[in-house]
Amino acid sequence: MFESIYPLIDSILIAPYRIGLPALAAFWLGTAIIALWCTIAGEISMSLIYIWNREYYTDLNRKMTRMNNLSIEAIRHKQKDTFKSANKWANEYFGKVFFSHAALFAVSLWPVPFAMAWLQTRFSGIDIHAVPFTKFSLGYPFVFILSYIIVRYGFSKVRPYIPVLKKIDDLRAEDAKEAGELTSWNELAQIPEENKETANGNSLENKA
């Protein structure tokens, strides 16, 4: 099946390289357009995955925030056992949140290897730029990677003005608000002397 549609895909991808510009300019423009397509496809894929797993991401953030704040409160109230338990869970949820975000970002990169594979079939062995004072030359990987970085950065600036993607960003902001606000360790301060006795008498065990 792929073999039957590959000629169509190839003709679409190669079209920007044949718009009549000088060879070098056409190569940069065509590669930049492919980088833009990769960026758009990746951003849409990442948004769909987030919507599909929205409840899971929100729940993770909620648990991380709760355990982080609870551990700080435990320190403030000098409850060592509660702190150890809450901090252990907070660290676990921090790790899960970090890797879930990393995995979500990785989803946005899936078009890149396919683009690189196509570029290899078309431009492998062709020198695009010579490195001054050396025998080395730069080919399509240099042009594509640089174009992709620039295009993705530029896309991040216009993303808030794209209605569909802006809606996704609004949903993520709502989910972050629902998860609660993380208490900073910088806010941890010594309890005033007159409140020590009362604070030490309040147990946080029921919150854990």
Image (spheres, rainbow, N blue to C red):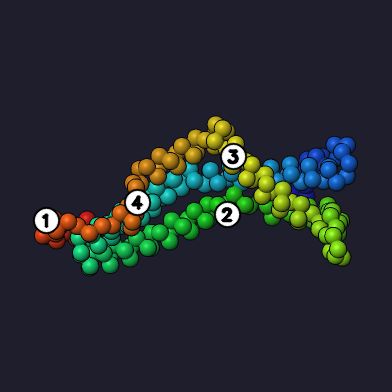
Type of amino acid at the residue the image marks with label 4 = Leu
Residue with the most extreme front position:
193
Neighbour tally class for label 4: few under 14, some 14-19, many 20 plus, Cα within 10 Å: some
* Residue 126 visible somewhere in the drawing: yes
Neighbour tally class for label 1: few under 14, some 14-19, many 20 plus, Cα within 10 Å: few
Disc 3 element: helix
The residue carrying mark 1 is 194
User: Which numbered mark, 1 or 3, is in the foreground of this view?
Assistant: 1
Query: How many numbered tags mark residues here?
Result: 4
Type of amino acid at the residue the image marks with label 2 = Ala
The residue carrying mark 3 is 157
The residue carrying mark 2 is 106
Type of amino acid at the residue the image marks with label 1 = Glu
- Tell me the CA gap for discs 4 and 1: 27 Å
The dot on residue 34 is none
Q: Position of residue 49 (x, y in %)?
A: 52, 47
Neighbour tally class for label 2: few under 14, some 14-19, many 20 plus, Cα within 10 Å: few
Q: Which callout, 4 or 1, points at the residue further toward the start of the chain? A: 4
Disc 4 element: loop
Disc 2 element: helix
The dot on residue 182 is 4
Q: Is residue 95 left or right of residue 143?
A: left
Q: Is residue 42 left or right of residue 32?
A: left
